[in-house]
Amino acid sequence: MEQMISEDIPRTDRGVPYVKMRDLKSLTGLPGSTIQHYANLGLLPGTVKTETNVAWYPPDTVARIRLIRLLQNRHRLSLAQIGALFRRNATDDEVAVMASLHEVVFGQEDPQAISREAFIRDTGLTSETVDRLEALGLLLPVSDGKFDREDVMVASLARKALLMGVDLEDLTFYSELVGKMVAREMRLRRGISRGLSVEQNSAMTLELTRMGRAFRIYLFDRTFQKVIVDSVSGDDLEMQEG
């Protein structure tokens, strides 16, 4: 979004001058076309224009561009994913933390990721079944139109479930409960990360992620074991009473 101002060189409230496109090109090493593309996608702060119709960029635009390049090159995020991060997080520091979390959870993009057509062919699922799995939240490809080994594994499980006569709708409690669990974990993280530096926030977030994984596996397995033991014990008691 552009603003029109009368002074020749706009400044922030702290007196820091805005910069021109040529300054951004010099400071970031990127061509103007790339910077303009970021701006067109809404990834950069809004510009202001002087009465001479010259566009000026806020001084923090340089840091934003460098963050975008980091997210692209290190974390392998698409511009669409980067835009979503900016929309969902209030500050660039929070975006950097979430990108680090994305890297830990998903790692680098699977070099053997396959297209949707290849996925359907290799898994034996129909296009309609794949659509339904995604709609039910049971199949969550990391990137649009690309499927990795974990997606293939889940497709294999879904195929077995269908052959057993299971309705995919009956499996949605997994995605529903996981969604609630992740939302609670994210609220917990935000609650204890206030006031931390980016480095401290990232380290704490990664540690919480590891803890969360461990708790989920432990509690699910132990709870399931307890239910089985109690069930068997109940059956034995009924047999003795009979």
Image (tube, grey):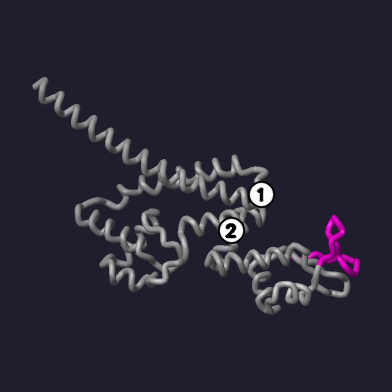
Residue type for callout 1: Ser
Residue 156: x %, y % from top left: 27, 60
Residue drawn at (58%, 58%), measured in percent from left and top?
85
Q: Do the numbered discs 1 and 2 sit on residues whose CB atoms are within 8 Å?
A: no
Residue 53: x %, y % from top left: 84, 74
Q: In this rendering, would 151 be left or right of 233?
A: right
Residue 138 versus residue 196 in the image, above or below: below
Q: Provide the residue designation for mark 1.
A: 197
Residue 170: x %, y % from top left: 30, 47
- Magenta-highlighted stretch: main secondary structure? loop
Q: Provide the residue designation for mark 2.
A: 85
Find out whether residue 12 is within the magenta segment: yes
Element at label 2: helix
- Using the image as rendered, state which of residue 27 and residue 228 is in the foreground: 27
Residue drawn at (85%, 62%), measured in percent from left and top?
11
Badge 2 crowding class, 10 Å Cα cut-off, few under 14, some 14 to 19, many 20 or more, is: some
Residue type for callout 2: Leu
Distance CA(mark 1)–CA(mark 2): 19 Å
Furthest residue toward right: 7
- The label on residue 7 is none
Residues rendered magenta in the picture: 1-18
Q: In this rendering, would 203 be left or right of 219?
A: right
Q: In this rendering, would 226 be left or right of 34?
A: left
